[in-house]
Amino acid sequence: MSKLSILAEFWRFLRVRKKYWLAPIMLFLILLSLLIVLTQQSALAPFIYTLF
């Protein structure tokens, strides 16, 4: 399964079940995880982790 098919299936789920309120939550979680992964090995890591 490719990543795009997972996103397409998730979008169909939101559309069919009318759960559009899940989209901003998922977007926030994805952006937060990207922030943590991308700053893990940088000099910014101690400053990012103090936010949590």
Image (tube, helix red, strand yellow):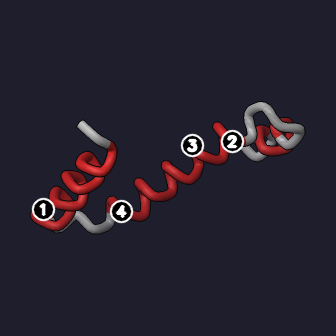
Disc 2 designates what residue? 38
Depth order, front residue of 39/20: 39
Furthest-right residue in view? 43
Question: Where is residue 21 drawn, in percent x and y?
Answer: 32, 66
Q: Earlier in the sequence, mark 2 or mark 4?
A: 4
Secondary structure at badge 3 equals: helix
Q: Amino acid at mark 4?
A: Ala
Q: Is residue 2 above or below residue 30?
A: above
Look at 77% across and 38% down and name the residue there: 49
Residue 23 numbered tag? 4
Q: Amino acid at mark 1?
A: Arg
Question: Where is residue 4 drawn, in percent x and y?
Answer: 30, 51
Secondary structure at badge 4 equals: helix
Residue 33 numbered tag? 3
Q: Quadrant of the C terminus?
A: top right
Q: Is residue 24 above or below residue 43?
A: below
Q: Residues within 10 Å of mark 3 (few under 14, many from 20)?
A: few
Q: Earlier in the sequence, mark 2 or mark 3?
A: 3
Q: Earlier in the sequence, mark 1 or mark 3?
A: 1
Q: Check if mark 2's residue and mark 4's residue have beta carbons within 8 Å.
A: no
Measure the C-alpha gap from mark 2 to mark 1.
Answer: 33 Å
Secondary structure at badge 2 equals: helix
Q: Residues within 10 Å of mark 2 (few under 14, many from 20)?
A: few
Residue 17 numbered tag? 1
Question: Where is residue 37 drawn, in percent x and y?
Answer: 64, 37
Measure the C-alpha gap from mark 2 to mark 4.
Answer: 22 Å
Question: Where is residue 50 drawn, in percent x and y?
Answer: 81, 41
Measure the C-alpha gap from mark 4 to mark 3.
Answer: 15 Å
Q: Amino acid at mark 2?
A: Leu
